Amino acid sequence: MPRLLQPTVPQQQPEWPDPERLDEVRRTLEASLPIVVPRESDLLKRRLAAVAEGRALLLQGGDCAERLHTSLDDVERRIDTLSRMASLLSESFLLPVVVVGRLAGQYAKPRSSAYETRDGVTLPSYRGDSVNGPEFTAAARTADPYRMLRAHQAAAATMNMVRALVGHRAGSPDTHVPEEMFVSHEALLLDHETPLTRVDPRTGRTYAGTGHLLWAGERTRDPDGAHIAFLAGVANPVAVKLGPAAEPDELLALVERLDPDQEPGRLTFVVRMGAGAVRERLPLLVEKVAASGARVGWVCDPMHGNTYTAPTGHKTRAFDDVLDEITGFFEVHHALGTHPGGIHLEMTGQDVTECVGAAGVGHEDLPRRYESSCDPRLNRGQSVELARRVAGLAAGRSAGAGAWR
Ligand SMILES: O=C[C@H](O)[C@H](O)COP(=O)(O)O
Ligand SMILES: C=C(OP(=O)(O)O)C(=O)O
Ligand SMILES: [Mn+2]
């Protein structure tokens, strides 16, 4: 018997309690200005084409979950930190570095579990500030569609600061600012993303208006799912996260859906397999995609495959695991003669204590300044140290197979 086609139920969406409020919010978003315009997304696509073709590196980074309330200091420090890292990478690899923030839109989170239980009380999980609040109360954890309006305002205000700071020597004289910077986030919350798509009157093509680069996460990358259908319908550059279970056929299906014209810069694969799996799992994926003729970018997210719970109960990641996954990623590409296109990090410019193993942070320090509402970020010192260590990998570039260590 033929399988009946079912309408696709999108993964990882909140349960909005009030459909009328949701409709009102969607209409308000439809009538709002977008955060970015198509011309900028097209420019980023050209920059990412250089990444896919081995002529540039991508440095993508920022919070796991941005908060609705943020300070100018926070935005400045994160731009400054990304900029310092970009300089280190650019100087050592002798390649331009494309800087993309997880910024001005990273307000929605996929979760492993829809519910969280503490001391016998069960509540919906925190799904990012555009859905609910992280406080463990029934009121905070109830999804509220009005939060999407607040997230849109916060994104607009953050983007305004990015535009004010980047490319101008604003702020203190020794502040590092990149010449150009783009913004990105996971296109998770379809009730937010869909009303903010816009048709470019120049070309008639539809663009996401919430960010330059949007990605589908490891939990929402089903080639037949609603998130991939959404990304297939927009002309922005797009990315897909790939965990250790990703199979070559799934990647080929993603290429078919998202990049049927095999346009360099359109599709980036963000590999997040964990330090223990990347050397074994990545080669076949890269080989099969290359053999298909697709010209995608390959980027390493060394954070999401290396998360563990510390004795203090905090989610954390060890600097050495992060560096080891990046090293493995470079080794694989070096052995295959393909381009390790860059890194995707959860990081901040603040001196938080969320990841361990560099900048003097150990497990015992985690309670001191753990501020992330979701996953642990590299702090400023750890981020710059990581860039320095990755820059060191450039020295092995032409020295033969295995020389990335
Ligand atoms: O940032 C990504 C996800 O939201 C996060 O890794 C999932 O974490 P969880 O396993 O705590 O839900
Ligand atoms: C949810 C995330 O990643 P992944 O989909 O790779 O788990 C993330 O980048 O915060
Ligand atoms: Mn995360």
Image (cartoon, rainbow, N blue to C red):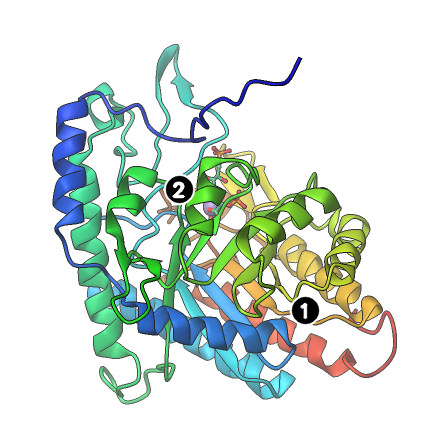
Residue 332 location (% of width, % of height):
78, 62
Q: Amino acid at mark 2?
A: Leu
Element under label 2?
loop
Three-letter code, disc 1? Pro
Mark seen at residue 188: 2
Residue at x 19%, y 60% (from the top left corner): 156
Residue 84 visible, this angle: yes
Residue positioned 45% across, 78% down in the render: 84
Camera-side residue: 297 or 108? 297
Quarter of the image where the C terminus is located: bottom right
Residue name at image x 58 percent, y 74 percent: 51
Q: Given this view, does label 2 or label 1 mark the residue nearer the observer?
A: 2
**Does residue 172 appear to the left or right of 184 in the view shown?**
left
> Tag on residue 340?
1
Residue 157 at x, y percent in the picture: 17, 61
State which quarter of the image contains the N terminus: top right
